[in-house]
Image (tube, grey):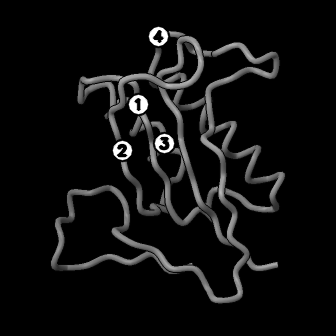
Amino acid sequence: MHLIRSKELSSVAEYAYAATAPADARLIFLAGSCPLARDGATTGVGDYAAQAAACVSTMTAALAAAGAGLSDVISTRVLVASTKQDDLVRAWEVVRDAFGDHDPPSTLLGVTVLGYDDQLVEIEAVAAVRD
């Protein structure tokens, strides 16, 4: 995979602006990773950072089941049920830190509601791996 940056664009963004996958890569499209315990209960109720961490954990497990890891992710979309920018940033910082030096393109969105009771965060991702 190749993460793409441009000197013509702002360096404020904490991620690459684009990414490409090799022609022989197998793409993995993940469902939205939710902050759900194995029994289906929503974890981290009321806590954006805790739910973001739970979503990262769910995403990591789904990637592993598909033969991939966080370093194979080529894009993410982080959905946060809030109209407050601080809440979005709180969730984003957890996601950003989980990826470390690997900073795939990402979109951070505030939404009105998510699918599960008490859910505040969801992360969508696409990964690419060579078999």
> What type is the residue that disc 4 sits on?
Gly
Name the residue at 41% across, 62% down.
105
> What type is the residue that disc 2 sits on?
Leu
Q: Are the residues flagged by discs 3 and 4 in contact, CB closer than 8 Å?
A: no
Residue 43 point in image, percent of width and height: 63, 16
Residue 128 point in image, percent of width and height: 66, 71
Spatial CA distance of label 1 from label 3 is 12 Å
Spatial CA distance of label 1 from label 4 is 12 Å
Camera-near label (1 vs 4) is 1
Spatial CA distance of label 1 from label 2 is 8 Å
Q: Which residue is mark 2?
A: 108
Camera-near label (1 vs 3) is 1
Q: Is residue 65 above or below residue 118?
A: below
Label whose residue precedes the other's in the sequence (1 or 2): 1
Q: Which residue is mark 1?
A: 80
Spatial CA distance of label 3 from label 4 is 17 Å
> What type is the residue that disc 1 sits on?
Val
Quadrant containing the C terminus in the rendered view: bottom right
Label 1 Cα neighbours within 10 Å, binned few <14 / some 14-19 / many ≥20:
many
Q: Which residue is mark 3?
A: 95
Label whose residue precedes the other's in the sequence (3 or 2): 3
Spatial CA distance of label 4 from label 2 is 19 Å
Q: Which residue is mark 4?
A: 46
Q: Is residue 110 left or right of residue 24?
A: left
Secondary structure found at label 3: helix
Q: Is residue 86 above or below residue 105?
A: above
